[in-house]
Amino acid sequence: MRGATIGPGGKAYAGMLLFRIGAPTEAVEKVTVGLQGGVFDADADSGPIEAPLPGDAPFLNIDDNPLVSYWNVSRDKAEEYMFEAAGGN
């Protein structure tokens, strides 16, 4: 099973691949994400949250098939996974 187990106060990282080079995109002014555990929809209290856009970005470009990675306790590993998913070498 992929994923991360962390204790109280620990950190975990996941990546979001919002678009692929050459794919048609749509500019969005907000991003809403849902956090869930290993069983889909098992926690009724974990509804969607609005994620802030990075820095001073007024919008993000997103294609019609965004990808979210598994949780990882290493930020470097999470970034490496997303780079590979985007077609990096």
Image (tube, rainbow, N blue to C red):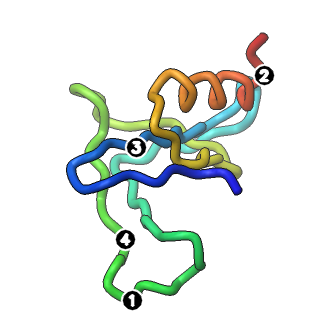
Please name the residue that numbered disc 3 is placed on: 12
Q: Residues within 10 Å of mark 2 (few under 14, many from 20)?
A: few
Residue 21 at x, y percent in the picture: 72, 24
Who's the residue at 38% across and 51% down the image?
A: 6
Q: Are marks 1 and 3 in contact (CB under 8 Å)?
A: no
Residue 68 at x, y percent in the picture: 59, 48
Closer to the camera, 27 or 20? Answer: 20
Q: How many callouts does the rendering have?
A: 4
Q: Residues within 10 Å of mark 3 (few under 14, many from 20)?
A: some
Q: How far apart, in angstroms, are the residues tagged by discs 4 and 3?
A: 18 Å
Residue 18 at x, y percent in the picture: 57, 39
Determine whether, in the image, residue 3 is placed left or right of residue 37. right
Amino acid type for the residue under numbered disc 2 = Gly
Q: How far apart, in angstroms, are the residues tagged by discs 2 and 3?
A: 23 Å
Determine whether, in the image, residue 44 is placed left or right of residue 53. right
Q: Are marks 4 and 3 in contact (CB under 8 Å)?
A: no
Q: Quadrant for the C terminus, please.
A: top right
Outermost residue to the top:
89
Please name the residue that numbered disc 2 is placed on: 87
Please name the residue that numbered disc 4 is placed on: 48
Query: Is 2 situated above or below 41?
Result: above
Q: Which of marks 1 and 3 is nearer the N terminus?
A: 3
Q: Residues within 10 Å of mark 1 (few under 14, many from 20)?
A: few
Closest to the camera, between mark 1 and mark 3, is 3
Closest to the camera, between mark 4 and mark 3, is 3
Amino acid type for the residue under numbered disc 4 = Pro
